[in-house]
Amino acid sequence: MTVPATPGRRAEAGVLPLDGAGVLVPAETPFRQVWRSFRKDRLAMAGLVVLAALLMLAVLGKLFTEWWVLFDPATVRLPDKLRPPFSIPSSSIGKELWPTLGLYPFGTDELGRNVFARMLQGSFVSLSVGVVAVSISLIIGITVGGVAGFYGQRKLGFVSVDTLLMRVTDVAVCFPTFFLILTVVALLPPNIYNIMIVIGITSWMGTARFVRAEFMALREQDFVTAARALGLSEGRIIFRHLMPNAMAPVLVSATIDVAHAILTESALSFLGFGVRPPFATWGNILADGRSYIFDAPWLFILPGGAILVVVLAFNLVGEGLRDAMNPKLRRRASG
Amino acid sequence: MWRFVLRTVLQRLLLLLLISIISHLVIHLAPGQPSEVDPMNPMMKAVDIARIRASFHLDDPFYLQYLHWMRDLVFGDLKSFRDGLPVLPKIWDRFLNSAPLFLLTTLIVWTASFPTGIHAALRRGSLYDRSTTLVAYTLISVPGFFLSYLLILFVVRTFHLPVIGQHTFGTEHAPLIVRFMDRIWHLAIPSIMAALTGIAVLSRYVRAQMLEVIDQDYVRTARAKGLDEDHVVYGHALRNALLPFVTMFGFLLPGLISGSVIFEQIFAWPGLGLLGYEAILARDFPMILTLNFMAAALTLFGILLSDILYAVVDPRIRLE
Amino acid sequence: MSGAEPQATPLLSIRGLRVDFATDAGSVPAVRGVDLDIGISETVALVGESGCGKSVTAMSVMRLLTGRISAGSIRFGNTELQSLSEPEMRRIRGAQIGMVFQEPMTSLNPVLTIGKQIEEVLTLHQRLTSSAARAHAVELLKRVGIPSAERRASQYPHELSGGMKQRVMIAMAISCRPKLLIADEPTTALDVTIQAQIMDLLGSLQQELGMAVLLITHDLGVVAHFAERVAVMYAGKIVEQGAVRDIFKRAAHPYTRALLAALPDPLRTAARLEAIPGRVPLPRMLPAGCAFCARCKHVFEPCPGVLPELFPIAPGHSAACFLHDPRRAPSNVPCQ
């Protein structure tokens, strides 16, 4: 005998047939499953770390450039224009204008402003452009998709709610998005809120479509019928039962949409319709920097690199989440 | 089949009408007035503004303006605010510039994406797969103009060659072959730059599609028949994986107008995207509206084309 | 046919087959030492619950596994399949060993016509011209009982019912007159009425072509009418094998008995269907000894710790249970 039998094994086996090898493994919560799978994806984890750092940076940026001004992004020091990174202010700069660290970590721009301070301020603005725009798009998309998916069969005169909302979505899809954004941004007073709103209201169609699909699939399932049979209110069914189930794809696309919104903002800046001063965003620092690409490449490469890293992080986290939430892929990965 | 096409075309036309009305609304509700075309211009006097407003029916009610625009568009005498020249010939000129760029870009994207994506899917988890994944994500994540500027910087510094514009300045009288090669060179760089993001996105999609298909039962059946791996992959799996891409041909069309704004701006390529951009800057409403209308029409036409193509290639789809 | 005893030179001979699958939690055994012989023209059923490794065994024969064969030999005639190169193996697949799968719905390529999918095998292995292949494919469709075969040949799989698709799969599998047909749960996905038709078709084809059949199923009821010999698998091992008669009349392993007790028997009135308590242990949590011991009524000392070998019961009938170990079995054990 290689393995000693547990004493009393025989008696136990007779009484508890489920014991031993047939023991039930405690079920993992879906969240833990996703997290376990996500954690193995090294690229996605790297992305998550970058995003956590970005969030901290954005908060610190807001803190140190607006509330407790350690780094002033607006101070103009003309004698010190276009200084390379890590240079020390020249002697002509008065003591009161000296940058906090005693040097320009990222150099200065064409007005002698501290690029480090501008990037710090921009981190908050860029991130909030992305997050606010995507929040707007999510609110519209989830509402339209949810109503179409759940109340789709109701009739409004001669068309059903579903037909009406989906035709509206079709119309929205047919607008050349970037062109529309350009037009509207060009016509509206140029401010940061308009840019957020315009990006938001031109990018909700995808969310609406898959929330609708998800709702239509879910509302036919047994647990919804059961919930109805129990007399639960519609609101409760929607928010307690349908929403959480539809959230997985929404979360994935929201993550990727933030990345997209940040890129759109930088493209708008490039065409001269971006966020206007006094706000610095990575997009407009980059767009302004292109004029000095030969003389002061850091004005171009630093913000460009920063956008690349952050957008990449959002994309990797989004794709990692998608893989981790896709049960089919997960099963494949494990055997 | 024909009934389907007819019904869809009618539906799409209705949508198109709706879209054009909404675009008018968007423009008319926006605070900027076309009479502010050039408010700084001291030559622009109140009289001129009034004359412009009158000639473009700007003081009429909204629906009349819309009808005017519609009629002018149909009869081809819609005129630009900016210089009073007819809109359609201008668009045609620019289209001739955009088309080669668009075609070359599309060609590059499609020929590069498929081998890359298929290869990555078949060697899932290999070094090749992981590195193309990372490169693809990087390309998706980089602002297009950032990469283009870096390339321009590189080419200009290393080869001392001009890359901006449609041809090199001063080559107008060079021999035909030189002009031709010059033209190709000036076309190649913007096409490649515009294609990079497309390659990244499409090759990821090809990979995902291929992975989806390669685990299907009928692929196993094909192997159990004794077919060799190439036949299994290209004869059985790829055929199925390709189906969704047929529909993407349709979605490419609108890219002709709005997809190229950034790259045409960077490379000073006088195409449709740049035309739209200039029109927006100048608040040239007839031009903006017409381009917008055409882009929407192309989108709708593209969707129709996709539906039909899908029914042609997938025996399971019937157009009802 | 007598069939109870494997013939002297079996057509297929599996010895000590072990298959492992790599997972996050390390390597997991799916098949743990299977010995199985199939004689020429013999019909053998491999029976077991889902996940017991029976399909994996079949796929190992075809060498179409995603897992890894870590030990054992698979001889087909005089050829060791494991030592063949991939091109050599391809000449066996579809030509000498045909396979029918469980899911006719998804096993046919949706974008190719049925005719084309059958012709493909014929042009590949028999070097037929395309018109000859076409004619032959129509013949085959007629043979498997598909009405208006010419028209069907130019149709796509979605235009056929599930039963029809399975007939097409069978036509494809027998198109090159294979010596061995592996049918992996060929009727599980079909309606009960269709199931009987498909099994009849397989039976008559077996007779006509004189091919051996390895039928993989979880349904002992199917086995009784069709197979000559039965091998019962549990958790990656064969726990009992013998002639159909022996298995049904004198089942020796507690698991086989439990399976039989779970079978509805129309002749036994007031029969109580017995479910087997518990479930198949996960491959990574197997005990050192008999894998069935957690669910077995007769567990005694050696069971959890020692792996039982196949003990002979009668000629051609053996069971892997210590109840039948002459050295260990307690005398008071009930034996049918």
Image: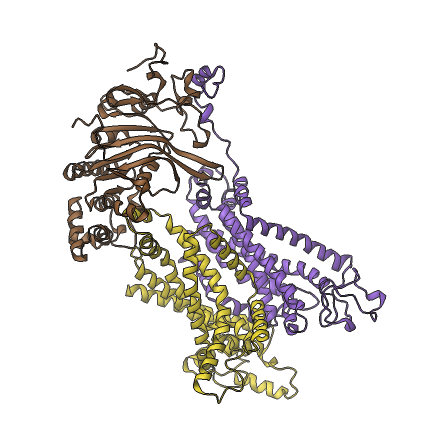
Q: Which chain is brown?
A: C
Q: Quadrant of residue A62?
A: bottom right
Write the residue at 33% across / 65% down: B7
Give the side of residue A323 with respect to residue C6, left or right: right
Give the side of residue B236 with respect to residue A193, left or right: left
Q: Is residue B190 above or below residue A44?
A: below
Q: Is residue A31 above or below residue B174?
A: above
Q: Which chain is yellow?
A: B
Image location (x, y in percent) of residue A202: 53, 63
Furthest residue toward right: A95
Image location (x, y in percent) of residue B115: 41, 60
Q: Nearer the viewer, residue A14 or A90?
A: A90
Q: Quadrant of the C terminus of chain A?
A: top left
Q: The purple chain is which one?
A: A
Q: Quadrant of residue C29?
A: top left
Can residue B16 be seen in this snapshot? no
Image location (x, y in percent) of residue A197: 59, 62
